[in-house]
Amino acid sequence: MTAVSDRLADGQLVLDSQVSLPEVLDLLIVGGGPMGTACAFRAKELGLAALVIEMDDLMKRIRDYAKDKPILPDYGGGDTMPFPAAGELVDALRFEPIDKDRMVEVWKGLYRKYSVPAKVGVELLELTRPADGVWQGAARNHYTKQSETFSARHVVLALGRGVPRRLDIPGNVQDLALRLNDAQEYVGAPVCVIGGGTSAAEAAIAISNAKAQSDSDESPVYWSYRGRFMPKVSQALAPELFDVMMINGNLRFVLGSDPVGVTTHEGQEYLSIRTTVNERPGYPREVVQLEFPKAFCVACIGADRPDPLLRSLGVEFVPKESGDGDRLVVSPLLESRRAGVYVGGDLLSPDYAETTNFDGHPSSFAIRPRRGNIKAALRDGVLLAEIVKQRLEGREDIRVELLAAPPMAVRAPEAASPRESYQGTPLPAESTQPQSPGRLISLLADGTPADEFPLVGQGVTTIGRQGTTVQFPQDTMLSDQHAAISHGPGGLELRDLSSQNGVFLKVAEGRVLTLEPGTVVKAGRQWLLAETTAAGNAVVHYDSVGSEVARHTIAENTTLILGRAAPATVLDGSDSTLSRRHLSLSTERGRLLLRDLGSRNGTFVKVEGAWPLHDGDLLWLGNQVLRLSTAIDQGTASSLVQGKASSPAAPAAEPAARPAAAAVPASGEPSVSFAPGKTYPFGKSQTLLDLALAKRVRIKYECKVGDCGKCRVDITAGAEHLDPRTPQEDKALRMIGHDEPECRLACLVTRVGGPISVQVPK
């Protein structure tokens, strides 16, 4: 078979020594990032027949980082974690600060050197287990455009959080390129690159250069981006993009455009891009579209945790308390509900649920924080290879003691064989250095973590442009000494160091803040100033340029809802950064209380004096958005992992189902129907919130006692079967601006006298 650089035409990695794998693998590893790599390397050391399959390419997420980005071993809490110790192969994965492209090159070279089998361009689609108990992985090979099947006794899902998104449009999007493999493949016809990130920019530049170097292709590259302005590119790519635009002259920006579907014409598939929509009264709507052969399109539209795939593979999820996401559920051995299928790495970040009983109530599951760094991924990979080894040996009580590799300055002794391990030291449970109380995580505009900065263990952490603990020298909106985080009587505190542009703290949804006179609040592009007048508490509204617009008085025991549209008091109907119902202001016992109502872009309060900080708080300073993390990774603090091997359930062709729902209650009996129609009996000694959580309905909650107002639901039928709202419930609903008759707080509904229907707000 013809070789293409470091792989064969079917995606099989070219190795220094040929490896013959059995028909039934000991271990199929899905994902070729740091965790999948460590798992494969340790499996090789342990003598297991293992294969890595990867939808894209090995280390794809590291490969797609911004050009010239250094990979730091201490990033994401790695400074408090050692590399795992095993044998020669795993030891070779240790690294010091290294350029991202060099790291990809080195690790791919280790696959070749140690002959670790891998196949790229292969996407797992389905897992089934026939009567013989061996997992069958159905996959699609994107190089050969054919289906493949892999048989394995155990499967490790090491997919990470960087699985490329597919276009959600009508038509056949299978085989649509989600990254650029070879720019030469796109010479000969007009090309469409979709997306606004680094991968899209690199693809557009590479294809433009390939066309410019061709003697026969004068067709352009169309860069489709949904924004109305040119997408931002990193400083490292800016010179290359400038050269493409000015010298090649073959790059066309198609701004404000969207892919709308894949159609077939005379046997060839085309991707349609909508570029213009014209609407005039009395005339039909006019739409202008461009069509490109699907083979000449690249969709670089970002990456997500592959929840739909994980669910289809039988991995369990439980809703988060916030209601805005889910956690994966695994056993202490990182095994899913499906025996022999394991999950690890960044799929579990920033936290996951751990249980020994998947049928138990979610409130009984332990929540395990997990650091999102390369050392943690390597640890998970080594751990799972060890677990699979013991499972294959028939052990029921699994016990793995992970060892710590010596510091990089002290190299491990040469192993006599790649399958022999050397003795390291147990992973330390405690450090002799003062433990950092947390970390500041800098976020990009889309919320993606960009960098991390540990807080000073003892003392003050300062933030600014220069001469501080945490520095952003390129941010001209920051003062040299801008803000400080210190240890106060109640924990961490934030202070403004007399900065020019101020320090702002995002108000967490559901948290009630007391506003002192003079406090400045930012909502969307609007500004509010709290004050006390003879008539009581009030806020003065200023627009985005600082002009006074209105003054609003909030009388005792009243609530004012502010936002972009009625029925809220409208601050600015044209401010798209405001939510329809953005925030509420109430007066109770003379205090002015602020609550964010789950606004899309948040409500920020200007910091004056010392403000207490909590885990997850967002800080806005200059052009920087920083998230505070005080979570301790319990999963990596211990060197010992143990648990019972799960008993293989009867093989089934379909994913193991969740516990069967209770039978639908008879007509007239107390029951709850959650939209879109699942009905459950309502038992005694429980609340409506308890029932929703037990049935894994995605619902927001926090306090469970009626204070936060997060668990609001709408009773769409059967309200007469509920007790009237209490004064406490009325007050909480009024504060969040939802005192309509159908609104209830699920945590305060304790009696249901007949069938009711419930709609949980999204």
Image (cartoon, rainbow, N blue to C red):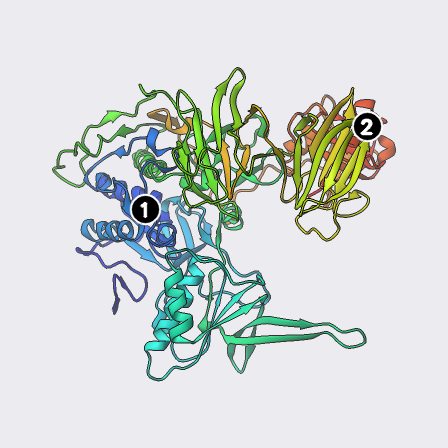
**Vertical arrangement, residue 182 with respect to residue 629, above or below:** below
Outermost residue, bottom side = 216
Distance, label 2 to label 1, CA atoms, is 54 Å
- Residue 156 locus on image (x, y percent): 38, 43
* Contact check, label 2 and label 1, Cβ < 8 Å: no
Residue 249: x and y in percent read 42, 76
| Location of mark 1 (residue) | 70
Where is mark 2, residue-wise?
A: 730
The answer to whether 334 is drawn above or below residue 26 in the figure is above
Q: Residues within 10 Å of mark 1 (few under 14, many from 20)?
A: some
Asked if residue 738 shows in the view, the reply is no
Whether residue 189 is visible? yes
- The quadrant holding residue 461 is top left
Percent across and percent down for residue 133 are: 41, 45
What residue sits 54% from the left and 50% below the top?
308
- Using the rendered view, name the quadrant where residue 737 is placed: top right
